[in-house]
Every structure is written in C-alpha cells, then in structure tokens.
Amino acid sequence: MSEKLKVLVVEDDPANLIVSVKSLERRNVEVFSAASAFEALEIYDKTRGLSAVITDIQLPGMDGIEMMHKMRVKEELTMISVPIFAMTAYAFEEDRKHFMEQGFDDVFIKPVNYDKILETIQFYL
C-alpha cells in the first residue's frame, strides 16, 4: 500500500471514539473523527480522497443509517464512491442483514478487530 489510508470514524461515545482513532493511527491510518452525523457530513464534504467511513449506528440527532443515505446521494452527484461501514453492538444476524440491505458495504460488530477493518477497507479499494 503506497498511499496512506484516510478513514472517517463517526462515534458519539468519547471513549469508543478515542479507542478507534488511536487503534487506526497506530496502524498508520490518517483518521478524521466526528461525534455526530452532522459533523461527519461536513467532514465528508470537505475531505478529498477518503478511503472509507466507519460509523456507529446510534448517533444523536441523525442515526448512522440516515447519514449513510445522505453520503450515498452525494456519491451519485460526484461520481466518487467511498465504502461506508457500520460499527455496532447489534450482533444478531438479522441486524447485520438489515444494515447491509440499507446500503452499508459491511458491518463490524463491537468490539471490533481493527486489523480486520483494514483488510476489509483494502478489499473495497
């Protein structure tokens, strides 16, 4: 991998956000972080060359599903596709299937394996 990955992490729990950011930075990833979907959409609009978005589902004001749908609309307008992954504690297979049907590229169950996340991102690039 010649170019450094750029990943946007969206997580409203401060402790979980710190763990995600530090875990990815230790793996040489450039991390952008947001504590809400609204903040994430701003970063998504301003940041060129994002490799992926990883988002919690339960966010204040706008959930991760609605945020992902807004990002998908922008993809259609810009013709730039970014893999978007759900990161959730909802571990039942029907939850995972539901999130995939909504349009996520994949679903990571908390606690997540960051090496597996990076493998998955590479698969989509």
Image: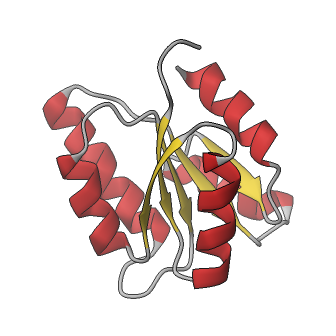
Residue 120: name its quadrant.
top right
Residue depicted at 73% across the width and 53% down the height: 108
Pinpoint residue 52: horizontal percent, then vertical percent: 48, 40
In this orientation, which residue lies closer to the viewer: 24 or 96? 24
Pinpoint residue 93: horizontal percent, then vertical percent: 84, 57
Q: Does 71 sit above or below residue 29? A: below
Q: Does 111 sit above or below residue 4? A: below
Pinpoint residue 16: horizontal percent, then vertical percent: 67, 75
46 with respect to 27 (left or right): left
5 with respect to 111 (left or right): left
Tell me the colour scheme of the image. Answer: secondary structure
118 with respect to 77 (left or right): right
Residue depicted at 68% across the width and 39% down the height: 27
Pinpoint residue 113: horizontal percent, then vertical percent: 82, 50
Q: In the rendered view of the protein, which quadrant contains the N terminus? A: top right
80 with respect to 84 (left or right): left
Residue farthest left in this picture: 77
Residue farthest bottom in this picture: 60
Residue depicted at 52% across the width and 20% down the height: 125
Q: Does 16 sit above or below residue 40? A: below
Residue depicted at 71% across the width and 41% down the height: 117
